[in-house]
Image (cartoon, helix red, strand yellow):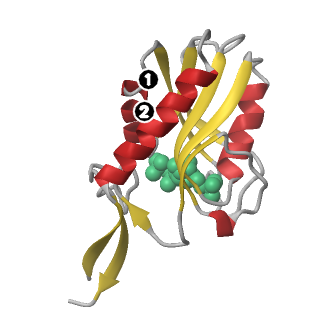
Amino acid sequence: MIEKIQTLISKQNIDEKIAEIASMIEKDYEHKDIHFVCVLKGGVVFTVDLARQINKNVYLHFMDVSSYGEDTKSSGDIKILMDLDESIKDKHVIIVEDIIDSGMTLNMLKKRLLGRNPASLKICALLNKECNKTDNIDIDYLGFNIPDEFVVGYGLDYAQKYRNLNYIGIISFEEE
Ligand code: PRP
């Protein structure tokens, strides 16, 4: 099979959107320290690019979760594969994700992190597949709503490939 990638969102569009979100966050957190919780692996590219556009201190935290574990069906809770290494109690936290699909991962993660008593907790995602929602989810900062296609690049992978593309593309497969 040949893998073909067609651009959905260009690097320039991503850069412009990140600048917009960064200035909204700067304004909303004017007198507060910001704590990003980056959800690995996909969220890493967006997290660091967004943090670099914010002209104030942003603390970076990393977490890796799986919503399905060994099962194909969700267990209703997430499995923490790698936890935060510091407390978020009384901190102003923003969870940063590359993509929200069904919304399950983020809803479960949000519930878990709220249990750790942050001062506030918001959600920031670069991409959202509106049509796939099984869970209602409030996204505080959103880059783009996208169609239900298999997207790669800018953190998102197909079989761990293409995370380093500087744009978002739709991948398709053709017979050789
Ligand atoms: C993706 C994404 C979210 C989750 C969204 O991660 O980064 O964490 O899926 O899906 P949901 O809204 O249906 O719960 P993935 O499992 O692909 O892991 P990765 O980021 O390590 O590639």
Residue 96 visible in the shown view = yes
Q: Mark 2 points at which residue?
A: 50
Mark 1 falls on what kind of element? Answer: loop
For this view, does 126 lie left or right of residue 175? right
Question: Which residue ends up furthest to the bottom in the rendered image?
Answer: 175
Q: At 32% across and 58% down in the image, what residue appears?
A: 10
Residue at the spot 50% in from the left edge and 29% down from the top edge:
23
Residues at circles 1 and 2 in contact by the CB criterion of under 8 Å: yes
Q: Quarter-wise, where is residue 176 in the image?
A: bottom left
Is label 1's Cβ within 8 Å of ligand 1? Answer: no
Residue 69, how many percent across, how many down? 62, 51
Query: Relative to 23, does residue 138 appear above or below in the rendering?
Result: below
**Image position, residue 9 (x, y; %):** 38, 60
Depth check, front residue: 41 or 123: 123
Question: Which residue shows up at 39% across the image and 28% down it?
Answer: 53
Q: Nearer the viewer, residue 141 or 117?
A: 141
Residue on which disc 1 sits: 54
- Indicate the position of residue 71 as horizontal and vertical percent values: 65, 59
Residue plotted at (68% across, 54% down):
103
Q: Distance between the residues labelled 1 and 2?
A: 7 Å
Of 52 and 151, which appears nearest the observer?
A: 52
Disc marking residue 160: none
58 displayed left or right of 162: right
